[in-house]
Amino acid sequence: MARREEDLAPDPGELEELCFRLKERLDEERRRVQVGGYSAHGVLARIGRIDRLVVVGDIHGDLESLEKVLSTADLTRGVPEGCLLVFLGDYVDRGEASLQVVYTVFKLKLENSGSTVLLRGNHEGPPQLPVYPHDFPTRLQKAYGDRWLNLYEAVTGCFSRLYACALLEGALFLVHGGVPTSRRGLDDLSKAEGPLLEELLWNDPMEECGCAPSPRGAGFLFGPDITDSFLKGIGAKAVIRSHEPCNEGYRVSQSGRVLTVFSRKGYPYFNSYGAYLDIRKPHHIEGANQLAEGYIKKF
Ligand SMILES: [Mn+2]
């Protein structure tokens, strides 16, 4: 049954208030450094000891996929102690429920602040790196009329405060696009902006060594040799990223160095499955094949 866009739109006052509280919360995280299950190092979230890690890929305005993930992972009533929930970005555009997805994800973060990390996708990137299609402003206009610009600024003000990447010490690097093509360490990641931020949000893996221009017109393609030296430098074993639709909802590439997970199912991607990761004892992960064999949940 198709739901109408107007039925999905949250109350504008409520959404604005939510954005205001989230901005405050994210600013506070940067000042406090230690936040529940992770610590904020600039735009890098460093994840400490946790028992369970749930990772959600692109949602792109599809409330059904988001609700499916949360209910299957049993997180609808909150994120339990010892568990960390990480979103890899691309919450908006291409789906008719962008506003409701933003509302749900922001609320989830506020209600489970110390156990939820929201990463930035390229659809939540800086204004100098525009994306196509970007139908989010149109959705706001349709739902809220004259008030749309206020709400757009409120929501994008939150987007600009989201983390650029996360590191689960000794095991996993989490990011929307991919690893940078020039040598970068934790210090650089914590201050990522400009060209480095672009690479984190836009890059895609390739099987050939080295790097190449991206057909997307932003970011680069990075090879397994680049991934290897990057992971060695930050002391991690594998990359979990999103950004590319996969027919099975996930894909292992670069001989087990990279796992792509995509959580939006259906039109306009026509993937047979959406997927997310539900990893027990995430510090023991040695590579992407292990993730694919034991911890991928398809729907
Ligand atoms: Mn993307």
Image (cartoon, helix red, strand yellow):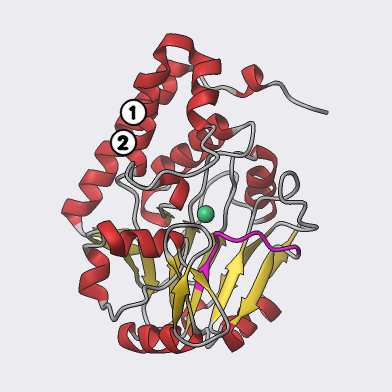
Residue at (45%, 52%) from the top-left corner?
Answer: 121
* Residue 42 can be seen, yes or no: yes
* Residue 39 can be seen, yes or no: no
Residue at (57%, 57%) from the top-left corner?
Answer: 57
Which stretch did the figure color magenta?
240-247
Mark 1 belongs to which amino acid?
A: Glu
Q: Nearer the viewer, residue 230 or 212?
A: 212
Residue at (76%, 58%) from the top-left corner?
Answer: 273
Mark 2 belongs to which amino acid?
A: Gly
Q: Is residue 14 above or below residue 123?
A: above
Q: Position of residue 37 (x, y in %)?
A: 36, 63
Q: Nearer the viewer, residue 198 or 83?
A: 198
Residue 70 vs residue 267: left or right?
left
Figure quadrant of residue 218? bottom left
Asked if the residue under mark 2 is in contact with the one under mark 1, i.e. CB atoms within 8 Å, the reply is yes
Residue at (65%, 40%) from the top-left corner?
Answer: 62
Which quarter shows the N terminus? top right
Q: Secondary structure at mark 2?
A: helix
Q: Is residue 89 above or below residue 293?
A: above
Q: Dot 2, how many residues are within 10 Å of its Cα: few (below 14), some (14-19), or many (20+)?
A: some
Q: Position of residue 173 (x, y in %)?
A: 42, 74
For the residue with label 2, is its CB less than 8 Å from the closest atom of ligand 1? no
Q: Mark 1 — residue?
A: 153
Q: Dot 1, how many residues are within 10 Å of its Cα: few (below 14), some (14-19), or many (20+)?
A: few
Q: Mark 2 — residue?
A: 157
Q: Is residue 282 above or below residue 137?
A: below
Q: Main secondary structure of the magenta part?
A: loop
CA separation, marks 1 and 2? 6 Å
Figure quadrant of residue 146? top left
Q: Position of residue 87 (x, y in %)?
A: 49, 55
Q: Secondary structure at mark 1?
A: helix
